[in-house]
């Protein structure tokens, strides 16, 4: 049989080296991300790591389809039966790991509830529901598989070099690309890491933070509905049914919506549509109670670069004046104190009486996180975490006796 027939096809050769290059680059991205401090650059590295991993999964699937429809070249006659069995076992394990590693990464990303878009083009759907326990297991499994694949790649490359330099057979030569392909491979080996590095915008080893002042919180603490209404006839007070109420928000990461809620907040609602002058809201929010269905993400958001919960554990929302807009809608002059900053907030809400005597209060507010110094240092100008945050209020109220 001629040497040409002993060579792999051009498609098989191209897939082999492209997958090998992407795997090596992606293992490097994973190790780099693990060593970086939390920053926009770290998240960007992870986005590239995830996107490259999904590309590897697709290309390995294509290569398996090729193997299903094409017989590989016969192994060199110089190989011993033991070498043939070792080669067959190694290739089988390589295929299993090349599939298992990106699949566990996809699963880990799903249970950790970190949505992302493939190279920024489209959102990759989740394949599992969020689960903190499964996320911890997924991190361990994904890391173990990565090290196993790295070890197997070193063994595979070492065996190929042994055949080429010591045995001087055709094992490596028949998988080596033709002259044009070899040039393309060398350009890709240099160009792909350079391209990724240029898109990362640099890496950081420390996470900068700016510390605000608690003066605004102190000022807000001295103002509440009781003070505002001291000289007026107060409207009736309403008790909040917390089981049927929600204070939620929607932020965006890589332009993908990320939903969350605050599980602990204390509303002091005094309102009467016929006594707007005597009405006022005062809501205290425990920032540490935020929940986005991802423990890792929530821990990051609580840190000093974001909400700085240790220093600013509560937010305060206070209204003082109301005006009717018709059809059960009202507008209030409101101020929000958050992370040491106080800002006026446009607040339009619905006040709907229910058939059982309760009232439903609903509102939607769009905030800019930069107004409250949420996301300091490099986060302040990086829009991978969106600047606009949608806040949704849905309270079920019962009249106080």
Image: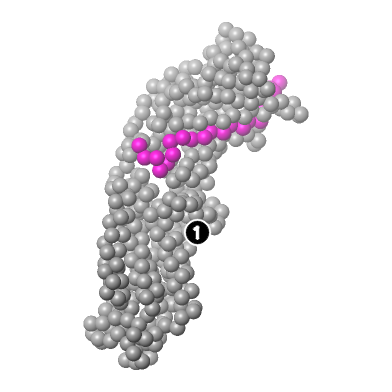
Residue 295 image point, x, y percent: 48, 47
Read off the magenta span. 381-401
Residue 309 shows up from this direction: no
What is the tally of numbered marks visible in this picture?
1
Q: Is residue 383 magenta?
A: yes
Q: Position of residue 288 (x, y in %)?
A: 48, 37
Question: Which residue is at a point 40% across and 78% down the rendered structure image?
Answer: 91
Q: Is residue 161 visible?
A: yes
Could you tell me which residue is drawn at 48 percent across and 31 percent down? Answer: 367
Q: Secondary structure at mark 1?
A: helix
Q: Residue furthest right?
A: 355
Q: Quadrant of residue 270?
A: top right
Residue 44 to residue 98: above or below: above
Residue 359, relative to residue 76: is it above or below? above
Residue shown at 43% from the left, 23% from the top: 342
Of residues 211 and 9, which is closer to you in this image?
Answer: 9
Extreme front residue here? 180
Answer whether residue 238 is magenta in the image: no
For the N terminus, give its image quadrant: bottom left
- For disc 1, the marked residue is 107
x then y, percent, for residue 391? 53, 33
Closer to the camera in the image, 294 or 171 = 171
Q: Say which quadrant the C terminus sits in.
A: top right
Residue most extreme to the top: 231
Rendering quarter of residue 56: bottom left
Colour logic: one colour
Residue found at x 45% / y 52%: 121
88 is higher (above) or lower (below) than 303: below
Alpha-carbon neighbours of circle 1 within 10 Å: few (<14), some, or many (≥20)? Answer: many
- Nearer to us in this view, 281 or 190: 190
């Amino acid at each position: 049989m001629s040497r040409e027939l002993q060579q792999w096809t051009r498609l098989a050769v191209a897939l082999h080296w492209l997958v090998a290059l992407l795997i090596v680059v992606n293992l490097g991205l994973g190790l780099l991300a693990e060593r970086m401090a939390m920053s926009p650059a770290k998240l960007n590295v992870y986005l590239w790591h995830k996107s490259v991993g999904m590309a590897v999964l697709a290309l390995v699937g294509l290569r398996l389809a090729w193997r299903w429809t094409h017989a590989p070249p016969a192994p060199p006659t110089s190989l011993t039966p033991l070498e043939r069995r070792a080669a067959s076992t190694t290739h089988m394990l390589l295929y299993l790991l090349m599939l298992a590693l990106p699949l566990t990464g996809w699963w880990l990303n799903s249970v950790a509830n970190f949505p992302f878009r493939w190279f920024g083009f489209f959102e990759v759907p989740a394949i599992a529901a969020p689960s903190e326990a499964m996320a911890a297991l997924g991190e361990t499994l994904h890391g173990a598989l990565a090290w196993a694949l790295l070890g197997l790649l070193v063994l595979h490359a070492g065996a190929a070099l042994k055949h080429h330099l010591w045995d001087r057979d055709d094992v490596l030569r028949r998988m080596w690309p033709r002259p044009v392909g070899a040039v393309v491979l060398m350009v890709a080996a240099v160009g792909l890491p350079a391209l990724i590095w240029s898109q990362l915008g640099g890496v950081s080893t420390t996470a900068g933070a700016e510390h605000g002042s608690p003066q605004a919180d102190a000022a807000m603490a001295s103002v509440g509905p009781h003070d505002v209404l001291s000289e007026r006839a107060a409207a009736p007070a309403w008790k909040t049914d917390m089981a049927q109420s929600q204070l939620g928000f929607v932020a965006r990461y890589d332009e993908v919506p990320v939903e969350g809620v605050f599980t602990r907040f204390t509303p002091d609602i005094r309102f009467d549509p016929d006594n707007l002058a005597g009405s006022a809201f005062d809501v205290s929010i425990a920032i540490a109670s935020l929940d986005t269905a991802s423990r890792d993400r929530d821990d990051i958001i609580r840190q000093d670069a974001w909400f700085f919960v240790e220093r600013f554990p509560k937010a305060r929302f206070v209204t003082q004046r109301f005006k009717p807009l018709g059809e059960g809608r009202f507008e209030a002059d409101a101020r929000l104190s958050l992370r040491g900053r106080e800002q006026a907030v446009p607040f339009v809400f619905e006040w709907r009486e229910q058939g059982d005597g309760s009232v439903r209060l609903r509102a939607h507010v769009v905030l800019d996180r930069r107004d409250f110094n949420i996301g300091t240092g490099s986060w302040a100008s990086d829009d991978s975490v969106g600047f606009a945050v949608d806040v949704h209020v849905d309270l079920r109220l019962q009249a106080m006796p």
